[in-house]
Amino acid sequence: MFKRIIIAVSVLLAFGAAAQGQALRESQISTYSVQSAILGEEVPYNVYLPKGYDASGTQQYPVIYLLHGLYGTHVDWATQGHMKEVVDELIASGECRPVVIVMPKAGDPDINNNWNGYFNMPGHSYEDFFFGEFVPAVESRWKVRSDKGHRAIMGLSMGGGGSTVYAQRHPEMFSSCYSMSGWLDNSEPDANAPKNKFYYTSKAVHDFSAVDFVMKADEAALARLRTVKWFFDCGDDDFILDLTLRMYQAMRLRGVPAELRVRDGWHSWEYWHTALRLSLPFASRNFE
């Protein structure tokens, strides 16, 4: 009981320091939101602030956008991925620069009745929201470097596909992209399937296929892709492994450098938790 009281007091002190513009004694994850006119709703997100972050100071940090998967929300990386412990360790060891990490909500466990996904769909223009409202709001609120050289994107499964397509379609925004078990393509949904929210999620992944983007890119688009550092990571027992291999082969065929890791594991939080130990140093190495 006494230990829990001490922890609670420490958390309150950290939040108090942040509110007063003092340097954080410890890193913290907090929940905020952005009001979206495009989506017509308030969109929550989690943000990781490193130890020493000072809202009134002069230091600005690189920023990583860390995307969740299907059935997930903005809290998953903290509650299931235990990302705070990993980030703290990597920063303390010097493997990752002190960084602000932003985790937006783009889904719900009820995939049939609620929107899931990072793309524009009929009645739900999430990509327009992300680049038109979310990124500007986040980067004006937190002390981050708002340029390509200090911005990275990564994610798991649906978020791995979303991060890849975002970096393909907006290469001027990101220095690197790391896909974990990425949902990079999808077969065309059955036209006779129920037109619920998941139907449109699946169709969007098909319509915005990351593999097709590379194969159909002209030389100008390929040149832009080469300005991003790419990394594809998937477990050897993952049902989505073939998509990762197809993606990597497409990149090789079109002359876009990329890294590939096939590690022991499958589509699980254990795998994605360990993926952070590769993805965060990778992003850090590729910040200017």
Image: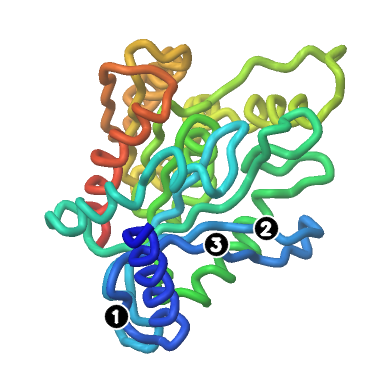
Q: Are marks 2 and 3 in contact (CB under 8 Å)?
A: no
Residue in the picture at 32% in, 70% down: 61
User: Separation of disc 1 and disc 3 at Cα?
Assistant: 22 Å
Q: Please state, as top left, top right, bottom left or bottom right, where the N terminus lies in the image.
A: bottom left
List the residue tagged with mark 3. Answer: 31
On residue 192, the disc is none
List the residue tagged with mark 1. Answer: 59
* Tag 3: amino acid: Thr
On residue 43, the disc is 2
Q: What colour scheme has been applied to the protein in the rendered image?
A: rainbow
* Tag 1: amino acid: Gln
Residue 221 visible in the current orientation:
no
Q: Are marks 2 and 1 in contact (CB under 8 Å)?
A: no
* Tag 2: amino acid: Val
Is 253 situated left or right of 204 in this image? left
Give SS at disc 3. Answer: strand
